[in-house]
Amino acid sequence: MFKNKKIRWSVIKGLCLAIIVSAFFLPNYVKYDEQGNTIFYVWVNGVKAGSCVSENVEDLIREARRRIAAGSDSLVLIDADVEVRREELVWGKVDSEETLVEQIARIMKADQKETLQRSYTIKINEYTVNIGTSEEVLNLLNAVLDKYDGGNLYNATLVMDPERELNVLTTQVVRNAEERAKAQKEDDFYRVAGMELYLQNALESLESSEEKDFEDYELGLIDLSYGDTVEVVEAYLPQSALTPVDRAIEEITKDQEKNKIYEVVAGDTLSQIAEDNGLSMEKLVEMNPTLESASSMIRVGDELIITSPEPELSVIRQEEMYYEEDYDADIIYIDNDEWYTTDRVTRQEPSAGHRKVVAVVTFRNDTETSREIEKEEITIEAVPKIVERGTKIPPTYLKPISGGRLSSGFGRRKAPTKGASTYHKGVDWATPVGTAVMASCGGTVAKAGWGSGYGYVVYINHPDGRQTRYGHLSKVLVKPGQSVSQGQKIALSGNTGRSTGPHLHFEILIGGSQVDPFKYMN
């Protein structure tokens, strides 16, 4: 009995010693120390990840992030609120670094907020669109060209923009055949040297200097480029910010109403400008603060705002074209310094000619912007129009009084008094007796005195052959034969002759016949 108890006690002591030894030597347990031991528990986003013997867990967090993002081009956004809690223990279990990293990665991945994909932002003027891959970017850019490049002669490429300091890509359109020829030429350069190269270049120069016949021209599309600056930058964006390439193609290629500046050229009228650009007159006037109404004057060189349908990304193309057409020769002008600019006489009537042409025509989208003739053959010579024209600036006509109320216009009217004419041959301004009357235009006084129905009257002959008359005056201040300048005081208004009240009667005569003065006064 005693012996058995002794054996059991020895076994118990042995087991206790083995446990104590194991506790001190196993790696996942902290060794016993009389002063206590510190274990650090790592919490991530409020979840306990595990424990370790070091408070510095930054390397473990970085490794966990690296493992989550490994094998992907995407940029992963993860909230990582890390808390390290310390405890003093006699002993306790700690996790290996590998286990702790895996646990941290699992918690962080569960709280993964968003994945930012590697993508591309395309900017065209004020328009921007985000595309997922570089292949899709090129698909979009080439889709814009496809409308005009049915033979797939050109391809869009992306190159670094040399004018930008940052890494910004821009576009370049290359002709497939030209790229192949360029590569071939580079190969030939290294194979051909010395005199052989000199003779080859001389022969090419001689061939290019020979005049081409019409059949020597290839005709068709010869150049293609973008009409707007395209900027492409790499970015990391969420999937929700990306536009499917098919929709992006539709957005970029469909026509939008865009404001443009139109410069007025000789022969333009507001109505024609509006019609050519698909605008109503009201819309054209509304868009341009410089225009008061549809009858506003425009001059060569004036700039008007117009709208025209254009896509977000325009295409500039050049086509070599053959055509035959009737044409007019340029007008030949003969200047006459004795005539006014309003005087002109046709000395020879024109006759259209006929020609064959090869020209390079430049288009912006579907609108022709220029035409350069490369070869021309006249089959019927055009006869030019010959016009003799004056060079002197004609005199101008001003209102002959300041103020006054228009009391009777030019033309048909009711007779103001019994026996008066129902057709008024001038204009009347009601004004007090004694109002100063000025010469509407410089000239020579032809008559000054009494004029029957006119009362006191002044007639002035002007250099352009016209005559002005001023009637119902109270006092005449000039004499026949006297030269007067524009704006010079010539009389005082009154109420003489056949008159219904104080006013000035004013006429302009051309070829001896009265005309509406308002058509000639400035």
Image: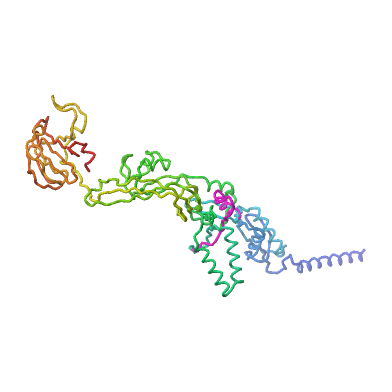
Q: Could you say which is closer to the camera, residue 103 or residue 176?
A: 176
**Left or right of 344: which side holds 382?**
right
Which quadrant of the rendered structure holds the N terminus? bottom right
Q: Residue furthest front?
A: 380
Placement of 42 over or under 253, stated as above or below:
below
Q: Residue at x 51, y 58 (%)?
A: 212
Q: Could you say which is closer to the camera, residue 200 or residue 237?
A: 200
**Left or right of 515: which side holds 228?**
right
Q: Which residue is drawn at 19% across and 39% down?
A: 511
Residues shaded magenta: 135-162
Residue 385 position, x and y percent, is 34, 47
Placement of 406 over or under 214, stated as above or below:
above
Q: Could you say which is closer to the camera, residue 335 or residue 517?
A: 335
Residue 146 position, x and y percent, is 57, 50
Q: Residue furthest top?
A: 418
Residue 338 position, x and y percent, is 21, 50
Which quadrant of the rendered structure holds the C terminus? top left
Residue 231 position, x and y percent, is 51, 57
* In the image, residue 85 lies in the stretch drawn in magenta: no
